[in-house]
Image (cartoon, helix red, strand yellow):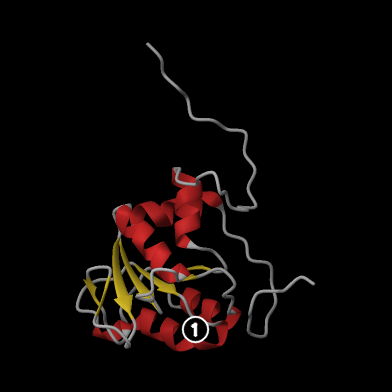
Amino acid sequence: MAMEPASCSLKTEIVIDIPTLRRILLETRVIASVGLSANWYRPSYFAAKYLQEHGYRVIPVNPKYKEILGEKCYATLLDIPERVDVVQLFQRAERVPPFVEDAIKISAKVVWMQLGVINEEAAARARDAGLEVVMDRCMKIEHARLFGGLNFIGVNTRVISSKRKKVITN
């Protein structure tokens, strides 16, 4: 039995093109990760560690912790004292709207909802406020897929390409 991602009311196909994903990943550097866990085995921790190792500043947003991955943890997005480019949401779809409102208040550029997280109303609100929205995608997986970082385990990226990097030999 196939399971569908959690969503709120409107049901649409989520499409975001590869050049847009690539641009977002190249132009943004500071990520506020809402729901980041300090437990190493949680997907949010694994993704944040990967992003840190690839040059991103990941600011944890979780009232349970004081620090995660060497970064001070904030209780809310509104508590972060610096500019945030991306608000990354590790939250259930029904919990997304207040975080989108806070993302708008802090002038984030992008709201990124993780795999399985789809909330069309919240996405529309973010877009209406001028933010870009990515839903049902993992930043770590997309970065690895687009910039080389997938290993032998692999990931179903829904993209098949025969393009290869040009190799220069002397």
Q: How many labels does the image show?
A: 1
Q: Which of 60 and 125 is in front in this view?
A: 60
**In terms of image quadrants, where is residue 77?**
bottom left
Q: Where is residue 130 in the image (x, y as percent from the top left)?
A: 43, 72
Q: Where is residue 28 in the image (x, y as percent from the top left)?
A: 34, 59
Residue at point 42% right, 52% down? Answer: 23
Residue at point 45% right, 52% down? Answer: 143
Residue at point 63% right, 53% down? Answer: 156
Question: Looking at this rendering, what residue extends furthest in the top direction?
Answer: 170
Q: Position of residue 38 (x, y in %)?
A: 34, 75
Question: Looking at this rendering, what residue extends furthest in the right direction?
Answer: 1
Residue at point 58% right, 52% down? Answer: 155
Horizontal arrangement in the rendering, residue 25 relative to residue 76 (left or right): right
**In terms of image quadrants, where is residue 98?**
bottom left
Q: What residue type is labelled 1?
A: Val
Q: In which quarter of the image is the C terminus?
A: top left
Rendered position, 94 above or below 58: below
Rendered position, 91 above or below 141: below
Rendered position, 50 above or below 149: below
Mark 1 crowdedness (10 Å alpha carbons): few <14, some 14-19, many ≥20? many
Does the rendering let one see residue 111?
A: no
Q: Where is residue 60 in the image (x, y as percent from the top left)?
A: 31, 75
Question: Which residue in the protein does label 1 denote?
Answer: 96
**Secondary element type, mark 1:** helix
Does the rendering let one see residue 145?
A: yes
Q: Quadrant of the N terminus?
A: bottom right
